[in-house]
Amino acid sequence: GMSVVGVDPSAVAIDTVRRRARREELSLETYCGGVFDYPTQPPGRFGGVLCFGLLQLLPAPEIPRLVARFNSWLRPGGLLLLTAWTIDDPSYALACRWPRVDGANADEAITPRSFRNPDGEIRTYLPLGGGSALFAADDWLVRDCWEGLGEEHRHGKGPWERHGELRLVAVSR
């Protein structure tokens, strides 16, 4: 008995999750668009938010805005489950050769680092310990934070890869 909302800019992803929900006879509301385009919700509407694979696609200055948005959506005691890439990611060394898009100096150790790849896509990497720093405000209680190399996987028929990951569980206060 929980209500679930899926937000994703990919029409393919939204269509896939809708079909699966119908097949499993699950109730699901969907929104095809970006998380910042998703209509403003009443404060405390959700008991949980899953943010999987989004932070690395945002410019670093947008991340605190996203964290604040999630906090406004969650009721007190609501859970945020979040993943992000860290500078331990094997692709970070290559990304360091791309143009910076966050306005930070290359040697800053405490801020996320954002780069624009040759295809124009943003890739942001959190420094080690950066996840806990993002949620250090009084609005959050970090319950679990893991950093390391994630499981080996592949996208479709692409090459096998592993990402330097942050996995975080935080409680909204």
Image (spheres, rainbow, N blue to C red):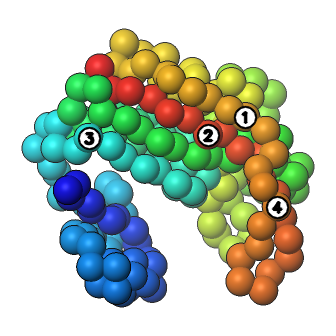
Q: Secondary structure at mark 1?
A: strand
Estimate the spatial distance between the alpha carbons at disc 4 and disc 2, rounded to whole Å.
15 Å
Please state which amino acid type lies under the numbered disc 2: Arg
Q: Earlier in the sequence, mark 4 or mark 2?
A: 4
Q: Position of residue 45 (x, y in %)?
A: 16, 44
- The residue lying at 22 percent from left, 54 percent from top is 2
Whether the residues at callouts 3 and 4 have beta carbons within 8 Å, the answer is no
The residue indicated by pointer 3 is: 47
Estimate the spatial distance between the alpha carbons at disc 1 and disc 2, rounded to whole Å.
6 Å
Q: Position of residue 157 (x, y in %)?
A: 78, 86
> Is residue 59 visible in this depiction of the protein?
no
* Residue 137 lies in quadrant: top left
Q: Is residue 166 left or right of residue 8?
A: right
Q: Is residue 39 left or right of residue 80?
A: left
Query: Which circle marks residue 152 in the picture?
Result: 4
Query: Which circle marks residue 167 in the picture?
Result: 2
- The residue lying at 63 percent from left, 66 percent from top is 121
Estimate the spatial distance between the alpha carbons at disc 1 and disc 3, rounded to whole Å.
25 Å
Please state which amino acid type lies under the numbered disc 4: Glu
Q: Residues within 10 Å of mark 4 (few under 14, many from 20)?
A: few
Q: Residues within 10 Å of mark 3 (few under 14, many from 20)?
A: some
